Image (cartoon, rainbow, N blue to C red):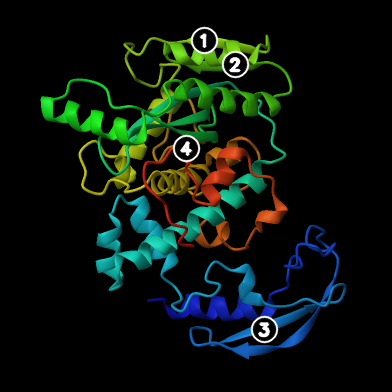
Amino acid sequence: MQDETSIERQLHRDSTFQPPYCPRSTCRFHLKRGEPFWSKHGGKSILRFPYFTHRFICNHCGKTFSASFFRLDYRQKIWGLNAIIFEDQDGGCSKSHSARKIHKGESFVRYRLKRMARWAELMHTKLTENTFIEEEIVYDGLENFAFSQYDPNNINHAIGKKSLFTYEFNFCPLNRKGRMTAAQVKRKKELEDKYGPYPRDAIRAKSRDVFRRLLSRTKGRLTLFTDEHFQYERAIEDIRTSKIDHIKISSRKHRNFRNHLFAVNNIDMQARHFASAFRRETIAFSKTTIAMQESFFLYIVNRNYMRPKFFKKHKHDPYSHKRSPAMEIGIMKKILTFEEFFQERVCKTQVNLNKDFENLYHSIDPDSRRPIRMTA
């Protein structure tokens, strides 16, 4: 339920709204901003708050569109629940808990989260597309599982050592390892006989993709801190470049703020705390690999843009409780609220998604053992 202040604020935004671009992808004003290209074209009654939406027409191509096209609640019949669902996700609540809280079905929450993840993916890409990496990078994988423990995976992510900004991540499947009972060994063999094993060199291949993208955004040399996983070194050898300074840190070193891997250790620790799908023992695990990546994307955009580096003051970083990671790398001037981050729609035709983000946007996992439906 929204209070009167937020309702008045929303009505004021509606009455003063100006379209930032033309929704038609072939129009020259789809990418070009800052010039008046539109005229008012009446309005239309809708069945939810604010019960009326202003319409516009592009003076160049003749496309008509509504103001609600640019908002997160476009074509949603119920207004005002997105922020609540996002806050529950950030607070470690399961989808079923959020559904009970707002008196809706779990599929309702799942649909809203998927929509927010896709918007966040496009917005994050737009904000970082012209950003160069000017700091050391810490890289590692966050291991978890989706659907069952016979489907473990790594989310490989590259994080700024100083800023704690997550620049890149991708997903790689793993084969189950470790001690298993006889029944578990039998079940694992049945799955591999039916579907085949996951690629043995997935960490190497996926890390290679991330390292190449990091290199393309680095003007000089790339300093990369990792643990002693042998596949990271092999991935760097595959790239055949001398522009990467690879520094390996033992995983046995004490994981405090003096550790060179602190940035990735801290984010992994808080991901397991704030995102229910990443907890060690949980019944809220992701049922598909796409849902797992979407949960992680919502976590990192919250971490990058909507909260400070640390909530408490730090002696060696006196502004860490006032500055977000996005502020640290210079792409934001303030810590954003949920409404500010999702205030304007970014179309897929306005950004260039990399291969991993393209698959995620279309809910495609080429290595999945089960079909994944596109629901948003």
Q: In this view of the protein, can residue 339 be seen by the observer? A: yes
Cβ atoms under marks 1 and 2 closer than 8 Å = yes
**Mark 1 vs 4, N-terminal side:** 1
Q: Which residue is mark 2?
A: 223
**Mark 4 vs 2, N-terminal side:** 2
| Label 2 crowd (10 A; few <14 / some 14-19 / many >=20) | some
Cβ atoms under marks 1 and 4 closer than 8 Å = no
Identity, as a three-letter code, of the amino acid under mark 3: His
Q: Which residue is mark 3?
A: 54
Q: Is residue 234 above or below residue 161?
A: above
Q: Which residue is mark 4?
A: 309
Q: In this view of the protein, can residue 161 be seen by the observer? A: no
- Alpha carbon separation for disc pair 1 and 2: 8 Å
Identity, as a three-letter code, of the amino acid under mark 1: Ile
Residue at the image position 46 percent from the left and 20 percent from the top: 201
Pair 3/4: label in front: 3
Pair 1/4: label in front: 1
Q: Quadrant of residue 310?
A: top left
Q: Which quadrant holds the N terminus?
A: bottom left
360 on left or right of 241: left
Could you say which disc has been placed on residue 247 in the image?
1
Q: Quadrant of residue 350?
A: bottom right
Check disc 4 and report its element: helix, strand or loop: loop
152 on left or right of 319: left
Pair 4/2: label in front: 2
Q: Nearer the viewer, residue 229 or 329?
A: 229
Residue at the image position 47 percent from the left and 43 percent from the top: 365
**Mark 3 vs 1, N-terminal side:** 3
Check disc 2 and report its element: helix, strand or loop: strand
